[in-house]
Amino acid sequence: MTGANRLAGNGAELVRERALAARIQRALERVYRIDRVVDIGDFVHCAETGRREALLLRETDDGGIEVSVQLPQLEEKAELDTLCQIIEGVSHFVYVIERARVGREATQLELEMQAEVDKWVVLAADVRDFDVVDSARLRARLYEHVTFTHDARCELGERYRIANDAAHCFVRRLERDYVGSARFGEMRRELRRFFQVGQEEKLRLGRAA
């Protein structure tokens, strides 16, 4: 992937979804201290009925990247699964664009592990006076009480389970080491370290928990 400044995209639908995606993009950029390259709203499109979120990438003949972030529509009362899908889509977008900006590649497992952590980051930020009880409750909903779409024996199923387990362990360590003592500055530094490293180090940070 080359030249994050050579991106093509468009999208005029999904007003509520685009607004939420923009809010999530700003939140992730603040946490990870990364510079804005492009606005995600220009790349958001509606996922086909019955399909989940997806980040579609295509390298153009001149070395640029075409991007489409496929997001599900929000219902009147947004369900956690829909919110998580939108967070995942934004997380994938932010991660890929930042990696392209600095000239680094990213694996699919990296994207999934980062997105699993980002779900907790974004949803935790919306909880007033967030503490270990809130964290444990959120962590259980995100990583324990889950149903996987793909069978564990297929490549996608295995990838999603590895990402879920690694993120769960990493978040549990953040909860134990930082949330309980309200050491949120240190926690953000650890989150930025997780964001910056590649696949093997992300797995190590998960296992180290």
Image (cartoon, helix red, strand yellow):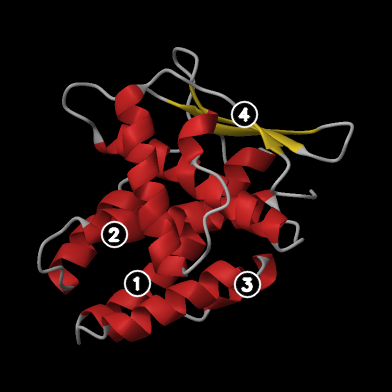
Q: Contact, CB < 8 Å: mark 2 with mark 1?
A: yes
- Amino acid type assigned to the residue bearing label 2 in the image: Arg
Residue 79 coordinates in the image, percent (x, y): 24, 32
Residue 57 coordinates in the image, percent (x, y): 70, 34
The residue lying at 49 percent from left, 39 percent from top is 40
Q: Is residue 181 left or right of residue 81?
A: left
Q: Marks 3 and 2, how far apart in space?
A: 22 Å
- Amino acid type assigned to the residue bearing label 1 in the image: Arg
Q: Closer to us: mark 3 or mark 2?
A: 3
- Amino acid type assigned to the residue bearing label 4 in the image: Gly
- The residue indicated by pointer 3 is 197
- The residue indicated by pointer 4 is 9
SS category of the residue bearing label 3 = loop
- The residue indicated by pointer 1 is 172
Q: Marks 3 and 4, how far apart in space?
A: 28 Å
Residue 48 coordinates in the image, percent (x, y): 50, 14
Q: Earlier in the sequence, mark 2 or mark 4?
A: 4
Residue 36: mark in rendering = none
Locate the C terminus by quadrant.
bottom left
The residue lying at 20 percent from left, 83 percent from top is 182
Q: Earlier in the sequence, mark 3 or mark 4?
A: 4
- Amino acid type assigned to the residue bearing label 3 in the image: Val
Residue 45 visible from this viewpoint: yes
The residue lying at 89 percent from left, 31 percent from top is 61
Q: Marks 1 and 4, how far apart in space?
A: 37 Å
Q: Closer to us: mark 3 or mark 1?
A: 3
Q: Contact, CB < 8 Å: mark 3 with mark 1?
A: no
Q: Earlier in the sequence, mark 3 or mark 2?
A: 2
Q: Earlier in the sequence, mark 3 or mark 1?
A: 1
